[in-house]
Image: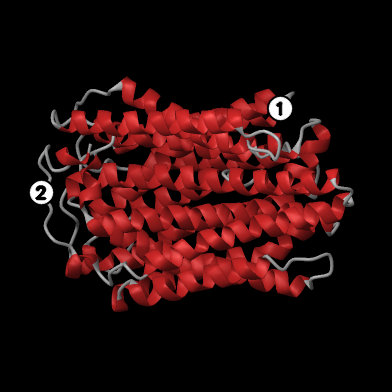
Amino acid sequence: MPADDTVDDPADSRRTPAVIRLLTLATFVVILNETIMINAIPRLMTDLQITEQTAQWLSAAFMLTMASVIPVTGWFLQRVSTRSAYATAMGVFLTGTALAAVAPMFEVLLLARIIQATGTAVMMPLLMTTLMTVVSERDRGRVMGNVTLAISVAPAMGPTISGLILQLGSWRLLFVAVLPIAALIGWRGLASLENVGEPQYSTIDWFSVGAAAVGFGGLVYGLSLFTADRVGVPAAIVALGLVAIAVFVARQLGLQRKSVPLMDLRVLAHRTYALALVLMSVAFMAMMGSMILLPLYLQNLRGLSALQTGLLVMPGGLAMGLLGPTVGRLFDRFGGRVLILPGSVGILLSMAGFTQISMTMPYWQILGLHALLMVSLAAIFTPVFTLGLGALPPHLYPHGSSMLGTLQQVAAAIGTALVVTVMAARADSLIADGTAGPLAALDGMQLAFLISAVISLAVVAIAFWMPGRAKQTEAEVPDQPDALEGVS
């Protein structure tokens, strides 16, 4: 699905193309499942007789699968039509959802989540690449603000929606409820979706696919194994993952000389895109870490039900969604810096506030901190997505959206694994020293939130380097096959 010239018809300048509206709706439904299991972790631990660290793999495996599959989508979207990509994504997602609804044991449920994630991995790059192709530059902020609903609000609303559904019965209802909605959207999409661009034949390097899967998967898996008394084996797995990632990068640099890389690293030669990539990854790392800690704190330590937990975090998710279009319009008018800088500070302040959680912290304070986090993320996501991809030439849109999606998921998975590991290690250490279980768990959560706050400092630092508009600061960067030849 190669990029064509963007549409720049004044008559259509204030209208979101129908193809974008349809893909946004489908993307919202599939990405919602990325975090829909977070609120169900306490119940899954009881029903399936699994530990907290095992249960979090239902979310981490989803993100890791997306990270492993998304690199392939740059090649895939150039090779097939829009309708074929959409049909593949929704068909695979529906298969995984149906399997999850009837899963008899944890291993089958985990496999179902991996299948779900494989379909989801295609939808997000498909949406972003199509948007950059059919929407004129002057309207991208506004349209991207609407698309933010699918990219960032869906994961934020996952715990709320799952809390409402879990109040009605088993965790299986999470998938039973999604199945007919996704099927209807899939059928409706195939009936009305039109192709954008023309497919181009190209080959795929399966060695690169394997190196990416081993590298990113090994990195996060190794991080999840760290405990206070187990360091050697996890460190070796992390090292193996880093080596595999280095091999993957070297392979892509070599393939670029033949113009057939799985993931074109020439996107990194564009400074604004590279900054946006790092900022988005670090922000997602902090966000997902906090999102998995809050339900554990509210349900396990404060005794709230899944429904009450969902309702408590619902205002923040709704605020994030409602602000998306407004943020997009502000970006079109004023540029990115006036949004990114205060947004990054808001993330840091909210994370710092969560480090003070206690057994008696008023619920209104928790609600306020979560709302501040969501609003701050809303201020960042739209301008960062738009500036980053807008800095690339059209033929690199598929690779730029693929890399952005890949590192976003890897960062989110690392954030999830990191905070859960830190929390569990700290709690185990305190319990071994005689501290009561609830107090040890609380201390572990406080430390984990502190880690997220430290990560948020990097978001603030990077925000100062982001430009107001890509066109005002972006120099022309050569995109010949040897553009990054010296980066190996």
Instruction: Please tell me whether residue 77 is drawn above or below residue 416 in the rendered image.
Output: above
Quick check: 134 left or right of 313? Answer: left
Distance from disc 2 to disc 1, alpha carbons, whole Å, reads 49 Å
Asked whether disc 2 touches disc 1, contact meaning CB atoms under 8 Å apart, the reply is: no
> Pointer 2: what residue?
478
Crowding around mark 2 (Cα neighbors within 10 Å: few <14, some 14 to 19, many 20+) is: few
Query: Is residue 223 among what the camera can see?
Result: yes
User: Which structural element holds mark 2?
Assistant: loop
Q: In the image, is residue 471 above or below residue 205?
A: below
Q: Which amino acid does label 1 sit on?
A: Phe
As shown in the figure, which amino acid type bears the numbered disc 2? Pro
Residue 228 in picture, x, y percent from top left: 70, 40
Quadrant including the C terminus: top left
Name the disc covering residue 106, or none. Answer: 1
Please rate how many residues cluster around mark 1, counting C-alpha atoms within 10 Å: few if below 14, some from 14 to 19, many from 20: some
Q: Which of 27 and 402 is in front in this view?
A: 402
Residue under the point 71% across and 44% down: 425
453 above or below 192?
below
Residue 11: image location, x then y, percent: 21, 68
**Residue beneath the point at 20% across and 28% down:** 255
Residue 456 location, x and y as percent?
Answer: 51, 63
Side of 305 where 336 appears, left or right: left
Q: As drawn, is 371 to the left or to the right of 46?
A: left
Residue 355 locus on image (x, y percent): 68, 65
